[in-house]
Image: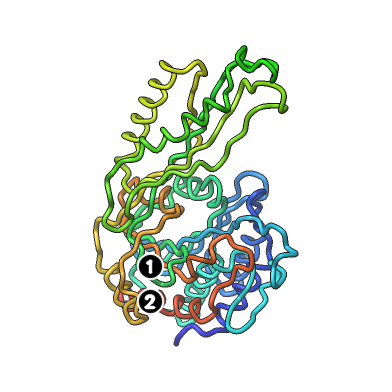
């Protein structure tokens, strides 16, 4: 029996109605809603509370020593100015085959599909030789703390494959960029704005340093992810217009296509800073504020090939990499667990006003994964 619209779309609409904007990242209401669904059908589930109103939820179905994890995050980015939305962002409005709302693509569509899959396996009393675990996490959008909590509490023990349901338009994701965020702090000397020669202008110094930061990027080109990138995402400095600014800082967002580039990039940044400090009056120091590894699938398991075959049925056989980071960066590396990044939702709907997901794509995804699980692991 297939997963029908009524099995999954009402769950998606209800999840959209539950605000999980991050910040503040409160997910407890969504977790309680999901837990109640599982309780009603008799699915074992556990709530992992940590921090203020933050929680993961874990549910499982099936037997066996090994596990398959289906994971998705419950938090979303903020909706922004709600007046600019075609439909209110927290009502889950359906229009012309699309479900609108914050998180519809990123990534409550996949979460709803995972819930529907677990429910359908239970309802149809499917006998499996693997335990299928649903992991709904908190705080993916900022710190990935939820995934870290789950990992520290043993979620990856005996896991032989993980499905990361981030939006890929049902294409098969086998790699993701890593992240290295650097805060660069420049200190000069204040003076009156009418006598700038008596001071050391930290903003002017930053304008010299910023172009040099791109020298830290490797020329290496990944066959799927392409080249690493740098975005200068924030800058601030100075106090008032008529004072030479003694302090300035800017933040660098490096996205690296291979994890062994991370240490090389740090080394190159340190060389750039040392050379700058040796030549310039303003002095610089750096702070690493966030880093996560790049991922690449190394072992194409039988279940991976089954999922790829199912994707091919929808014309989605292409192997892709994703530019964004996922909870997989916290879960996969310790045991180099085989994984796939695959889910409903269009790339151009990530974090945008009027975010929507295609209703049929969510249903197709749920059935694609449901069929793959049964064909791979039913007894």
Residue 202, position as x, y percentages in the image: 57, 23
299 lies left or right of 256? left
User: Dot 1, crowdedness within 10 Å: few (<14), some or many (≥20)?
Assistant: few
- Separation of residues labelled 1 and 2 (CA atoms): 8 Å
Numbered disc 1: secondary structure: loop
Name the residue beneath numbered marker 2.
Answer: 127
Residue 66 rendering spot, x and y as whole percentages = 33, 61
Q: In terms of sequence position, does the residue under pointer 1 or pointer 2 come before the other? A: 1
Can you tell which quarter of the image residue 63 is in?
Answer: bottom left
Q: Can you give x and y, in whole percent of width and height, for residue 168 in the image?
A: 43, 67
Report helix, strand or loop for mark 2: loop
Q: Can you tell which mark lies on residue 63? A: 1
Can residue 66 be seen? no
Q: Quadrant of residue 39?
A: bottom right
Above or below residue 25? Residue 375 is below
The answer to whether residue 314 shows anywhere in this view is: yes
Identify the residue at image location x=52%, y=18%. Answer: 282
- Marks 1 and 2: CB-CB under 8 Å? yes
Left/right of residue 118 with respect to residue 224 in the rendered view:
right
Q: How many marks?
A: 2
């Amino acid at each position: 029996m297939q997963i029908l619209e009524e099995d999954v779309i009402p769950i998606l609409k209800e999840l959209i109605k539950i605000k999980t904007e991050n910040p503040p990242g409160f997910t407890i209401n969504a977790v309680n809603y999901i837990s109640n669904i599982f309780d009603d059908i008799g699915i074992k589930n556990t709530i992992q509370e940590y921090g203020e109103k933050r929680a993961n939820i874990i549910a499982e179905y099936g037997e066996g020593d090994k596990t398959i994890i289906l994971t998705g995050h419950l938090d979303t980015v903020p909706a922004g100015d709600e007046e600019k939305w075609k439909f209110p962002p927290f009502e889950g409005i359906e229009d012309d085959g699309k479900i609108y709302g914050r998180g519809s693509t990123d990534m409550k569509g996949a979460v709803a599909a995972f819930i529907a899959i677990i429910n359908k396996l239970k309802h149809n009393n499917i006998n499996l030789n693997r335990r299928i675990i649903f992991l709904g996490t908190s705080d993916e959008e900022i710190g990935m703390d939820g995934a870290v909590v789950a990992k520290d509490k043993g979620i990856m023990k005996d896991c032989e494959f993980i499905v990361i349901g981030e939006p890929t338009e049902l294409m098969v994701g086998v790699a993701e960029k890593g992240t290295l965020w650097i805060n660069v702090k420049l200190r000069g000397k204040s003076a009156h704005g009418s006598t700038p020669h008596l001071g050391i202008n930290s903003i002017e110094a930053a304008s010299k340093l910023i172009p040099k930061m791109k020298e830290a990027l490797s020329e290496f080109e990944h066959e799927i992810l392409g080249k690493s990138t740098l975005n200068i995402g924030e800058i601030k400095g100075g106090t008032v217009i008529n004072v030479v600014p003694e302090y300035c800082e800017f933040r660098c967002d490096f996205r690296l296509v291979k994890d062994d580039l991370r240490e090389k990039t740090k080394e190159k940044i340190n060389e750039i800073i040392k050379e700058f400090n040796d030549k310039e009056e303003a002095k610089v120091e750096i702070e690493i504020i966030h880093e996560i590894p790049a991922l690449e699938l190394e072992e194409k398991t039988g279940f991976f090939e089954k999922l790829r075959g199912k994707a091919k049925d929808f014309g989605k056989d292409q192997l892709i990499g994703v530019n964004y980071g996922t909870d997989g960066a916290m879960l996969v590396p310790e045991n180099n667990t085989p994984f796939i990044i695959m889910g409903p939702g269009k790339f151009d709907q990530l974090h945008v006003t009027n975010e929507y997901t295609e209703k049929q794509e969510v249903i197709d995804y749920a059935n694609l994964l449901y069929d793959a699980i049964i064909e791979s692991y039913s007894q």
